[in-house]
Amino acid sequence: MAGRILIVDDAPIIRLMLKDILVANGYEVVGEGSDGNEGVQKYKELKPDVVTMDITMPEKDGIQALEEILAMDEDAKVIVITAIDQREALMEAIRVGAADYIIKPFETDRVLSAIRKVFGEG
Amino acid sequence: MSDEKILSVGVGDIQVAKAPIIITTYLGSCVAVCLYAPLHKVGGVIHFMLPKAGPTHEGLILKKEKYADTGIPELLRQLKNVFKLEKDAFVAKIFGGANVVKSVSRQFGQENVEAAGEIIKRLRMNILASHTGGEKGYKIMFDLNTGKVNCTVFGGPPIEY
Amino acid sequence: MEKDSKISKAVELIAQLSVDRASQVLSKLIRSGARITLERAYMTDISEATAKINAQENQAEVIGSMVDMMGDAPFKFLFYADAPSCLILTDLILQREVGLTKEFNIYVRSTIQEIGNIMASAVCNVFASDFEIAMKPTPPKVVHDFLGTVFQEFVMGTAAERDEVMIIESRFYIVRYDVKCTIYILPFPGSDKTINYICNTRLKGE
């Protein structure tokens, strides 16, 4: 049974692209957030199985949002999606507790393999 | 219009000319003050970006045309220099000062509009027309043959002032 | 090599690497080749540069994405395309038939927003990988307006600090769809130290 996913990104086009990929592959997109604050709020309300989280966002960035979500729920599964392809930044995301990261611009296969890995699917 | 030469004004810039020239510029948070001497068909435009002159963070002094308080008097000085006319010969029109990039915390557009108004008033000059504010850019074309300013706010129709 | 000439070389190097990387990510994002048709770095008086842009008659309506690249070498980044090109870019990003997007809706704006974000991030990544200078982008600001208005809002912060600036300009052409887009990269005052650092490390032997 495919899982419930919350998409957090300040760009509506990215949210649409991710939603198209996920829904086409049997996942349920339970909500969307356009900044870190909304991401944290929607996580609290919706309790998704997985979150995809942009890093560079207004109001609150993805790393702060990730920290707050993990403080609420240490088992939260958050995949960071970012255009910042810099070792230190990505290692920081993993250190804070991201389950995985995807670099923009992303391919469908990469998104699906990250989602499946987090769900423990083959 | 096809016989007139078009002079473009950039940010922190002044252009003075006589008919049949058209002076043009585009504005965002910057303000353009257009001065016109109707009896002589001469005029000028200053396109300034900040209300008040002062040194930069690195202590540099930049060109006076960038600021309302130094730039508007400089426009008058250039008009006097070139055309031998005092400020009483001119009327003013003011345009621009929009808040185009909404996330910027300081409202430079509004400050620029207020500064332009105060300085023109302090110089005891007439403001014949103005169109300022909003959230979209301005295109202005100042026809020195007629003194009219054709002003288009982005997304809207051209209006003559 | 004279100091000024070394600084020009450093900026040219930044320009070349940044534009190459930006072009690669743009091509990957839209799944179509984006050819670099112009790439130059030059000193210019801001008044003259903006006057030149303002002199273009019947000026295009553009959508621009402005990003501040923050770190030890602060730069400002602008990506823009004219209105019809923005509609095409939206269809390309969504992998839809070109011509389907007809309205300037939130998806068109956020297409330009995200292209700006991804290309600016690519330039930040160049600083990190090639010059070991950590840089990160801020969330983009999107403006849909006259080209002259967009450009002057872009240069405003730098114009408040300098009369003359070094600017990197590049144009891309997506041949298959006749789409032209432009980027500007503007070193913000404060990045001089970093440009000198690049001079002294990467151009040591010259």
Image (tube, coloured by chain):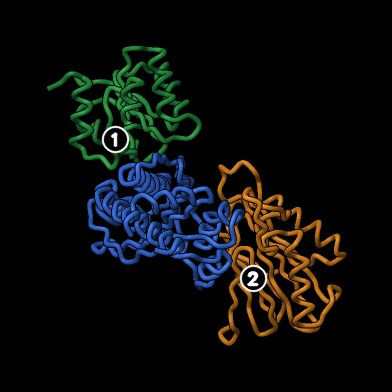
Chain colours: A green, B orange, C blue
Q: Position of residue A106 (x, y in %)?
A: 25, 40
Task: Answer with the quarter of the image where residue C156 lies.
Answer: bottom right
In the visual, does A48 lie left or right of A1? right
Q: Residues within 10 Å of mark 1 (few under 14, many from 20)?
A: many
B112 vs C135: above or below: below
B5 vs B156: above or below: below
A60 vs A14: above or below: above
Read off the chain for label 1: A
Q: Residues within 10 Å of mark 2 (few under 14, many from 20)?
A: some
* Residue drawn at x 23%, y 62% as measured from the top left: C176
SS state under label 1? helix
Q: Position of residue C167 (x, y in %)?
A: 46, 60
Q: Considering depth in this image, is C13 or A111 the residue closer to the camera?
A: C13
Q: Position of residue B118 (x, y in %)?
A: 81, 56
Residue type at tag 1: Leu
Dots 2 and 1 on the same chain:
no
SS state under label 2? strand
The label on residue A39 is none
Q: Dividing the image into 4 quarters, which one contains the C terminus of chain B?
A: bottom right
In the visual, does C138 lie left or right of C89? right
Q: Considering depth in this image, is A29 or B67 the residue closer to the camera?
A: B67
Q: Dividing the image into 4 quarters, which one contains the N terminus of chain B?
A: bottom right
Gap in angstroms between the C-alphas marked 2 and 1: 46 Å
Residue placed farthest to the bottom in the image? B3
Residue of label 2: B150
Q: Considering depth in this image, is C194 or B22 the residue closer to the camera?
A: C194
Q: Are marks 2 and 1 in contact (CB under 8 Å)?
A: no
C134 vs C90: above or below: above
Q: Considering depth in this image, is C81 or C77 the residue closer to the camera?
A: C77
Residue of label 1: A18
* Residue drawn at x 55%, y 66% as measured from the top left: C45
